[in-house]
């Protein structure tokens, strides 16, 4: 149960939730630089948020040279979380709308 609690804590912050929505929409691995471009947040903020999501078990990371790529880590519980995130309306937040248009 503790792992599940960490997952909910991880997505309980706007930047991390936005990262998850971007990765779910992309449906492919994304480089940290691509996520930074979409969200328009400082590199430090995105890197720290990605680290939290990786530690929680929601994302997998891999290095290619100097670039870090992130993908969704699929398992039964995460799929339930991902489906819940997909249900959040883009109209509920101006930042969400902006992310989807990029």
Image (tube, rainbow, N blue to C red):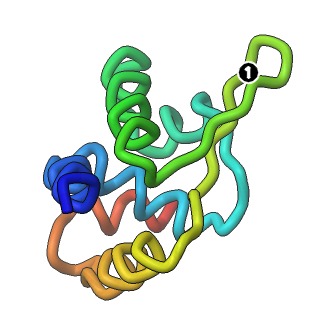
The residue tagged 1 is 67
The relative height of residue 52 versus residue 60 in the rendered view (above or below) is above
Residue 2: x %, y % from top left: 19, 53
Query: Looking at the rendering, in which quadrant would you find the N terminus?
Result: bottom left
Who is closer to the viewer here, 8 or 17? 8
Left or right: where 49 falls relative to 59? left
Residue 88: x %, y % from top left: 26, 81
| Label 1: few (<14), some (14–19) or many (≥20) C-alpha neighbours in 10 Å | few
Q: Residue at x 43, y 70 (%)?
A: 78
Left or right: where 41 falls relative to 72? left
- How many numbered marks does the figure carry? 1
Residue 49: x %, y % from top left: 33, 33
Q: Which residue is at the far front? A: 1
Identify the element where label 1 is drawn: strand
The relative height of residue 44 versus residue 86 in the rendered view (above or below) is above
Residue 60: x %, y % from top left: 60, 44
Query: Which quadrant of the view contains residue 48?
Result: top left
The relative height of residue 39 versus residue 36 in the rendered view (above or below) is below
Left or right: where 25 falls relative to 64? left
Q: Residue at x 58, y 67 (%)?
A: 74
Left or right: where 36 falls relative to 44? right
The relative height of residue 32 versus residue 24 in the rendered view (above or below) is above
Q: Residue at x 22, y 49 (%)?
A: 6
Who is closer to the viewer here, 89 or 68? 68
Q: Residue at x 76, y 12 (%)?
A: 66
């Amino acid at each position: 149960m503790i792992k599940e609690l960490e997952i909910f804590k991880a997505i309980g912050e706007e930047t991390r939730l936005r990262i998850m929505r971007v990765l779910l929409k992309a449906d492919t691995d994304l480089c940290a630089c691509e996520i930074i471009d979409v969200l328009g947040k400082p590199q430090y903020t995105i890197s720290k948020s990605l680290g939290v999501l990786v530690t929680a078990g929601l994302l997998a990371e891999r290095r290619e040279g100097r670039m870090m790529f992130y993908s969704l880590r699929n398992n039964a519980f995460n799929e339930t979380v991902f489906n819940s995130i997909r249900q959040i309306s883009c109209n509920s937040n101006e930042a969400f709308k902006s992310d989807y248009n990029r």
